[in-house]
Image (spheres, rainbow, N blue to C red):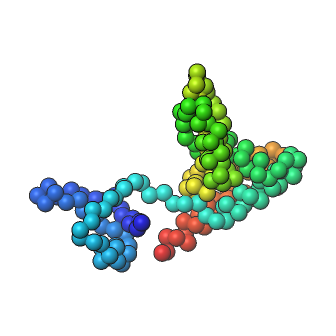
Amino acid sequence: MTQLDFPGTARWIPETQEFCIKPLNIPATLQWIMRQDPGKTYTCELKEFRRKRSKNANDYCWVLCEKLAQALHMEKDDVYRDQIKSVGVFKDFHLNEAEEKSFCTAWGMLGTGWVTERVDFSGDMVTVRAYYGSSRYNTKQMARLLDHLIQDCSACGIETITPKEAALLLDDWRESHAQK
C-alpha cells in the first residue's frame, strides 16, 4: 500500500470525468505511478490525515503506568488497561452469546491494551465493547490518554511533567515527520 497525502484542494473535471489532486510528495507519487499495471483496477480510500503518536509519548505513558502501579499496588499492565478503558477508543460489537468468548480472546491477542467488556445482553445476544490499544492511537487520542494518566498520577502525589512538556512529547513526532 502507498500513502499519498494531499491538501484539501482536490477538484473534479466534468469534461473528462477526472478527479484531480496535487500530492505533497511528488517523487513518491511518480514512483507509484511508474509501478502501476495498466490492466489492473486500483482502490483509493480518502480520509482526513491524522498524525500518529510519537514514540516518546508512548514511552512516557508506560513510565506513568509503572509509577501509578507502584503507588496503587497493582500490575503495570492492569493500570494501562484501566487507563485505556477510561479514555476509551472503542467499538461496540453485537454478537451471539456463543461467539463472545472466542471474539474476546481473539481481540485480546492483538495486544496488552486491546480489552473487551460486556456492556449489554438480551436473550442470546450480547454487546461487547472492544477497546483499541494505544498502538492504534493518533496524536489527539494519545494526548487524551497522557492527560488522563498525568491527572491520576498527580492525584496520587506522583511527580509528572508539565502540560507544556507533555505537549512537546506529542509534538516530537509531528516535527520529525514533517521534514520527510
> To which quarter of the image does residue 30 belong?
bottom left
Q: Is residue 23 left or right of residue 154?
A: left
> Is residue 157 at all visible to an observer of this figure?
no
| Outermost residue to the front | 98
**Residue at image point 54% right, 65% down:** 174
x, y percent for residue 178: 49, 70
**Residue at image point 59% right, 45% down:** 89
x, y percent for residue 3: 41, 66
Name above or below for residue 14 compared with residue 86: below
| Outermost residue to the top | 123
Q: Is residue 54 left or right of residue 12?
A: right
The quarter of the image holding the N terminus is bottom left
For the residue pair 45 and 21, the one nearer the viewer reads as 45
> Is residue 72 at all visible to an observer of this figure?
yes
x, y percent for residue 170: 61, 61
For the residue pair 91 and 108, the one nearer the viewer reads as 108
**Residue at image point 24% right, 62% down:** 20
For the residue pair 36 and 21, the one nearer the viewer reads as 36
x, y percent for residue 49: 44, 58
> To which quarter of the image does residue 59 belong?
bottom right
| Outermost residue to the left | 15
Name above or below for residue 35 compared with residue 42: below
Callout count = 0
